[in-house]
Amino acid sequence: MEEYVARLKNKFGYSDELSNFLDQLIPNLIKYYGEEYKDIILSALSNCEIHFQDKEEDPKTFLNSYFDSNKDWEMSIFVGAFYSNEIKVKDNQVVAKPIIYIKRVNLGIYKPFDFNDDRQVNILIHEICHLIKGYGKIKIENGKIIDSTGLIRKTYSYSQETGVGEENRDMVGIEEALNVVESAQILEMITGRKQEVVGYEAAGYSATRLLQHSDIAKVIRISQLRGDDSWIQYLGKEQSKKLIENFDVLVCTMYGSLEDFDKEKIEALYQKIGLAQDVIDDFVDNYCSKEDVEAFIQSLAAADKKTIEIIQQMSAVNQNCEEVSSSIMR
Ligand SMILES: [Zn+2]
């Protein structure tokens, strides 16, 4: 592991602090997600730079130069960090370049990242979890480019004239809810201390409850790392839709809505959140695990083996290469 981290340090110019942190983190990531995902974890981290904003750095300027793009990069003041996988089409190939960007200037004040601050580290792990679950997931389906991280599914359109444009993203709420729980649990493994969910507290609470059903936890984990919809097949369209919609309420209402502090609006928002939480609670309380869960998971495991083989082949091809590509069909 030390050798691997030394290579990352060298490749991306990481600080000693970040390298030491990765030394501690990576074995815990493997333990947490499972040995079978070790290659995905290692490939994801060696394919993506973790960047901490410099004191004088304008995020927009930095990102546009990093991605050789000219985007507007709308950033809410509430966003402290993000994972982004930028998709382009070059020479008829889809290429993607990821970054984890950690903001350090907020409201004009610069604060260096503190690896001893559990809250800050929790946020960093959160983005790394997005990265891992987003590695090697680009697909072309019906002329659209699909990228996913965990359960989140992003659809992009492409035309020669307008380039790549994001059309929509689905299942953001449920994945963010799961992701905050995952990062808190991983941080607990590292520190040995009980950790709070950071970011989407209400959603994290509901996700923790949902994951108490071990069959759901298992099937969701498989879908997150394979980028497929086996969890939807398992729960059924109607039931999974209920979860998707209500987790979206819990998570997405947190984006920006509080920026206009209208008392009535906030009350209505809390009511909406309360209702969404009730629906999920109700689902969790009345859920009966299916009898054929083991058979279902085994059938997925067989298919999963194939996926892992494909990813291994991909990472072998892409070693030392910044970009992952898959061919686009017209
Ligand atoms: Zn997130």
Image (cartoon, grey):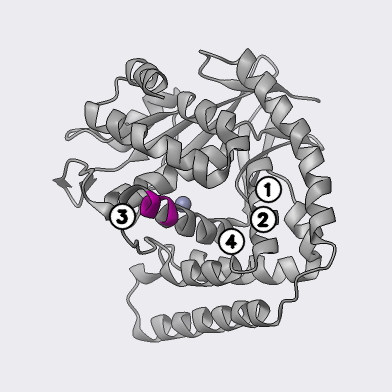
Helix, strand, or loop for circle 2?
Answer: helix
User: Up-down: is 110 above or below 205?
Assistant: above
Q: Which label lies toward us, 4 or 2? A: 2
Disc 3 marks which residue? 77
Q: Nearer the viewer, residue 19 or 172?
A: 19
| First reached walking from the N terminus: tag 3 or tag 4 | 3
Helix, strand, or loop for circle 3?
Answer: loop
Q: Which label belongs to residue 64?
A: none
Q: Which label lies toward us, 3 or 1? A: 1
Q: Which label belongs to residue 218?
A: 2
Q: Which label belongs to residue 174?
A: 4
Q: CA distance from mark 1 to mark 4?
A: 15 Å
Disc 1 marks which residue? 222
Q: CA distance from mark 3 to mark 4?
A: 23 Å
Seen at 41% across and 41% down, the residue is: 73
Q: CA distance from mark 4 to mark 2?
A: 15 Å
User: Up-down: is 52 above or below 313?
Assistant: below
Magenta segment, which residues?
185-189
Q: Which label lies toward us, 1 or 4? A: 1
Q: CA distance from mark 2 to mark 1?
A: 6 Å
Amino acid under label 2? Lys
- Residue 181 location, x and y as percent? 47, 59
- Residue 222 location, x and y as percent? 68, 48
Judge: label 3 CB < 8 Å from ligand 1.
no
| First reached walking from the N terminus: tag 4 or tag 2 | 4
Helix, strand, or loop for circle 1?
Answer: helix
Mark 1 in CB contact with mark 4 (< 8 angstroms): no
